[in-house]
Image (cartoon, helix red, strand yellow):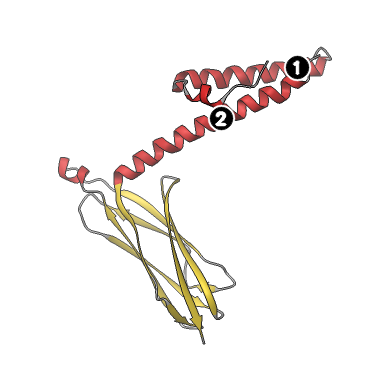
């Protein structure tokens, strides 16, 4: 049994891919049973079967991630308006503002109000900054065209170049990241 090419797996439909995953898991189970009873002669089949299963599962994950991105990107127009001063003083409280604007096509096609939740995760080093509250904020986006904002309050702890990041997620799907640099001085 030779190893399968990923390009061949990519040609499978979703249904064929699921059937292939089930068949490969079943074959791997049979190999384990043969090994347990001492009937397995070709031990290399473990390696090949595990490799094939990993390829199948990777393609399945890629397809799921692509579907989630398509769904998420159809809801959000601009997820990355992040503002923070370029120069800050150690020990002083500063606000990092995050603004998200909704995608307006859905709103124009129906009168129904659609609410989407975007989670903004603040990514900073605990060595560099103290936070006044949580590093996660939920942003509720309605189908009206009003931008929604949240604010994180940070306190620089030591001087030097600092990185501040905000990651955006919708329904556990990664949407993007905004990175900023700032310089802390005394």
User: Between disc 2 and disc 1, whose residue precedes?
Assistant: 1
- In the picture, which quadrant includes the N terminus? top right
Which type of secondary structure does the marked residue at label 2 adopt? helix
Camera-near label (2 vs 1) is 2
- Give the farthest residue toward the bottom: 186
Give the residue drawn at x 40%, y 35%.
Answer: 67
Contact check, label 2 and label 1, Cβ < 8 Å: no
When the figure is inspected, residue 97 is found, relative to residue 35, above or below; the finding is below
What number is the disc on residue 57? 2
Asked if one can make out residue 110 in the rendered structure from this viewpoint, the answer is no
- Give the farthest residue toward the top: 39
Give the residue drawn at x 61%, y 26%.
Answer: 53
Asked if one can make out residue 115 in the rendered structure from this viewpoint, the answer is yes
What number is the disc on residue 61? none
Please state if 54 lies on the left or on the right of 176 as rendered: right
When the figure is inspected, residue 74 is found, relative to residue 132, above or below; the finding is above
Which type of secondary structure does the marked residue at label 1 adopt? helix
Please state if 152 lies on the left or on the right of 33 as rendered: left
Q: Nearer the viewer, residue 119 or 103?
A: 103
Q: In which quadrant of the rendered view does residue 97 lie?
A: bottom left
Give the residue drawn at x 51%, y 34%.
Answer: 61
Q: Nearer the viewer, residue 68 or 153?
A: 68
Please state if 173 lies on the left or on the right of 27 as rendered: left
Q: Residue 6: horizontal and vertical position, in percent?
A: 55, 26
What number is the disc on residue 33? 1
Q: Residue 84: horizontal and vertical position, in percent?
A: 39, 72
Give the residue drawn at x 30%, y 45%.
Answer: 75
């Amino acid at each position: 049994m030779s190893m399968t090419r990923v390009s061949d797996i990519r040609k499978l439909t979703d249904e064929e891919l699921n059937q292939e995953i089930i068949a490969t898991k079943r074959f791997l189970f049979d190999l384990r049973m043969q090994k347990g009873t001492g009937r397995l002669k070709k031990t290399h089949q473990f390696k090949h079967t595990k490799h094939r299963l990993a390829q199948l599962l990777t393609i399945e994950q890629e397809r799921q991630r692509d579907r989630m991105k398509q769904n998420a990107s159809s809801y959000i127009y601009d997820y990355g308006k992040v503002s923070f001063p370029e120069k800050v003083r150690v020990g002083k409280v500063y606000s990092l503002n995050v603004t998200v604007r909704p995608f307006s096509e859905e709103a124009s096609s129906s009168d129904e109000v659609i609410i989407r939740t975007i989670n903004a995760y603040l990514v900073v080093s605990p060595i560099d900054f103290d936070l006044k509250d949580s590093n996660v904020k939920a942003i509720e986006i309605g189908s009206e065209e009003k931008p929604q904002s949240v604010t994180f309050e940070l306190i620089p702890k030591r001087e030097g170049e600092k990185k501040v990041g905000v990651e955006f997620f919708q329904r556990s799907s990664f949407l993007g990241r905004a990175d900023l640099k700032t310089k802390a001085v005394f």
